[in-house]
Image (cartoon, coloured by chain):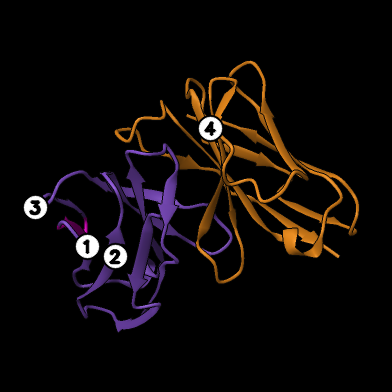
């Protein structure tokens, strides 16, 4: 079956522009997670959804970051007024539920470069 | 605050030379410890989940073990295709997110 897909695979933008990153989870997975991976850093949690609700937004670095999920499926991560420090690989993962008994399956990521 | 530390940062092995990667953790209420493999330019690929001290899981040349403070990923007779970054992560009772270590970059040469 299809895995987690993300688009675009690469995004180059200018400082101050807004960007939208998209994630399509595995069909039937109710939990969806966003992480960020910067060069030399571990994966950093941003936000997670259970259905269309976001019980934990604690990892969003600033109010320039927001995310939504519609129809219990596709999610969009939006970064407004991008800064150079936002450059990173943004990874999406999904799991059958948010229980620790369900492994998270990751997409290939979106590499964001802010010039 | 949950913390995960992996060592070594990088490891170079010759084909057939067995070794172990370490993941030590300080968490409140471990619900699961996860191992992932990540190839360059790709997302992490799930390998194992361990839930309680003493548990072991195996897959091909890999074996993961868990104690109350750390986990080991043992690689037996590695091959060049085992070259990747291996990530350890914890799932705790206070959150549904995974907290990751920074990984061990493994290179296996002929």
* Residue B23 picture location, percent across and down: 29, 65
**What chain is colored orange?**
A
Q: Chain of mark 3?
A: B
Q: Is residue A11 visible?
A: yes
Residue identified by numbered label 1? B70
Magenta span: predominant SS is strand
* Stretch in magenta: B60-67
User: How many angstroms separate mark 3 from mark 2 (CA)?
Assistant: 15 Å
Shown colour of chain B: purple
Residue identified by numbered label 2? B23
> Residue B54: which disc?
3
| Residue density around tag 3, few if under 14, some if 14–19, many if 20 or more, within 10 Å | few
- The mark nearer the N terminus, 1 or 3, is 3
User: How many angstroms separate mark 2 from mark 1 (CA)?
Assistant: 5 Å
* Residue A67 picture location, percent across and down: 69, 34
- The residue positioned 29% from the left and 33% from the top of the image is A101
Residue identified by numbered label 4? A32
Q: Nearer the viewer, mark 1 or mark 4?
A: 1
């Amino acid at each position: 079956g299809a895995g987690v897909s993300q688009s675009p695979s690469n995004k180059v933008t200018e400082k101050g522009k807004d960007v939208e990153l998209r994630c399509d989870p595995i069909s039937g997975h109710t939990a969806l997670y966003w992480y960020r991976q910067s060069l030399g850093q571990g994966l950093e949690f941003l936000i997670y959804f259970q259905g269309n609700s976001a019980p934990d937004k604690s990892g969003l670095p600033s109010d320039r970051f927001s995310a939504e999920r519609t129809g219990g499926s596709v999610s969009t991560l939006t970064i407004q007024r991008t800064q150079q420090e936002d450059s990173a690989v943004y990874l999406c993962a999904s799991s059958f539920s948010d229980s620790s008994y369900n492994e998270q399956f990751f997409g290939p990521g979106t590499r964001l470069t802010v010039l | 605050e949950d913390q995960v530390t992996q060592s070594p940062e990088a490891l170079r092995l010759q084909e057939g030379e067995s070794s172990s990667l370490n993941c030590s953790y300080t968490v409140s209420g471990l619900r699961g410890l996860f191992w992932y493999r990540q190839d360059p330019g790709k997302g992490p690929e799930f390998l194992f989940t361990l839930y309680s001290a003493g548990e072991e899981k195996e897959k091909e040349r890999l074996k993961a073990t868990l104690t109350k403070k750390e986990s080991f990923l043992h690689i037996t007779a590695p091959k060049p295709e085992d070259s990747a970054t291996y990530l350890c992560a914890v799932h705790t009772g206070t959150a549904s997110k995974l907290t990751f270590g920074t990984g061990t970059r493994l290179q296996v040469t002929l």
